[in-house]
Image (cartoon, rainbow, N blue to C red):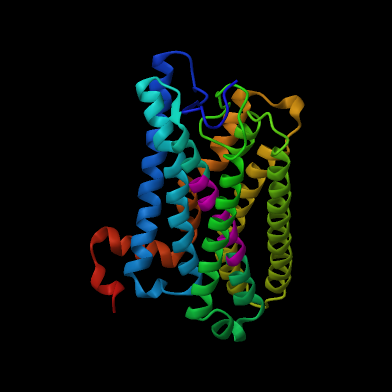
Amino acid sequence: MPNNSSVSEFLLLAFADTQELQLLHFVLFLGIYLAALLGNGLILTAIACDHRLHTPMYFFLFNLALLDLGCISTTVPKAMANSLWNTRAISYQGCAAQVLFFLFFFDSEYSILTIMAYDRYVAICQPLHYGSLLGSRACAQMAAAAWGAGFLNAVLHTANTFSLPLCQDNSVDQFFCQIPQIVMLSCSDAYLREVELLVFSFSFVFGCFIFIVVSYVQIFRAVLRMPSEQGRHKAFSTCLPHLVVVSLFVSTDMFAYLKPPSISSPSLDIVVAVLYSVVPPAVNPLIYSMRNRELNDALRRLMTGDVSKSKR
């Protein structure tokens, strides 16, 4: 029986059985990937070049765009390459790297989304303290903490998962390497250590979720008490994109890991994995720019090459 010292590669789940359908999946993933690169790249460039966007809200949006690019670049290029060359193989080291970087970007993104909820809470509920609570130093420290926590969690999970002896086959029932799929290949009781880490991670995720919910309850209460309709509209326009992104992120992730085993199937698992790992990085730029006048103006100046107005 093979174990983790003898397995040199894993076999990912193919999207389709025929070469024609594989090429179709390649084209679809290529379109989504290019859209994510373009959208997030424009947001990164606009925020970096326009001094009007050098505020805490856009600083965290800058971090979110970076994490989106990292998250989708960890999984989609390999899936496209496998579809193009009609193969399923990924090396042992490549699988470990994919798990490490996906967890790193994914967990860091969730932390950044939580911080962005805090940013909106302070801006709307405690506007007089906004400058002191969210100064440049505090923002940098919170962003560093989010990235650091994501990296630490990713290292712990990856090291623990790939230390398990593997005694099943090397087929992974997903289009990229995931910890639950790797753990299922283990024949050792040591997987209980991974379960403990997953419980800890779930507790952290649940705590962040509760923080976001409580923050938005306070935000909506404060917005509804605003006497000015224009003020309410402006507050909602800055909060709703973040709330939509959080809802998409959390709902797809929860469904992926909490769905009943009775409805689980390889095709459904792939669809859900695409929804939480591929779709958000591609649509997040669209969501954030849809009703954001400041960002749209910065993007317009960037597209027309009028950079001089951005630097005044």
Left or right of residue 42: residue 249: right
| Quadrant occupied by the C terminus | bottom left
Q: Nearer the viewer, residue 286 or 142?
A: 142
Q: Main secondary structure of the magenta part?
A: helix
Residue at x 61% of width, y 86% of height: 128
Is residue 111 positioned above or below 106 on the image?
Answer: below
Residue 149, x across and y down, in percent: 58, 61
Mark yes or no: residue 21 visible: yes
What is the count of numbered marks? 0
Relative to 274, say whether 250 is above or below: below
Q: Of 258 and 162, which appears nearest the observer?
A: 162
Quarter assignment of residue 76 = top left
Q: Which residues are magenta?
A: 100-115
Magenta highlight on residue 99:
no
* Quarter where residue 62 is shown: bottom left
Instruction: Give me the residue at 25% from left, 68% from top.
Output: 307
| Rendered residue at 73%/35% (across/down) | 189
Q: Position of residue 133 (x, y in %)?
A: 59, 81
Q: Quadrant of residue 233?
A: bottom right
- Which residue does the image show at 44% across and 30% down from the upper left? 90
Q: Residue 159's x, y, as percent?
A: 57, 46
Instruction: Judge by depth and name the residue closer to the eye, 15 or 157.
Output: 157
The answer to whether residue 108 of the structure is visible from this angle is no
Q: In this rendering, would 307 be left or right of 157?
A: left
- Relative to 215, is 13 above or below? above
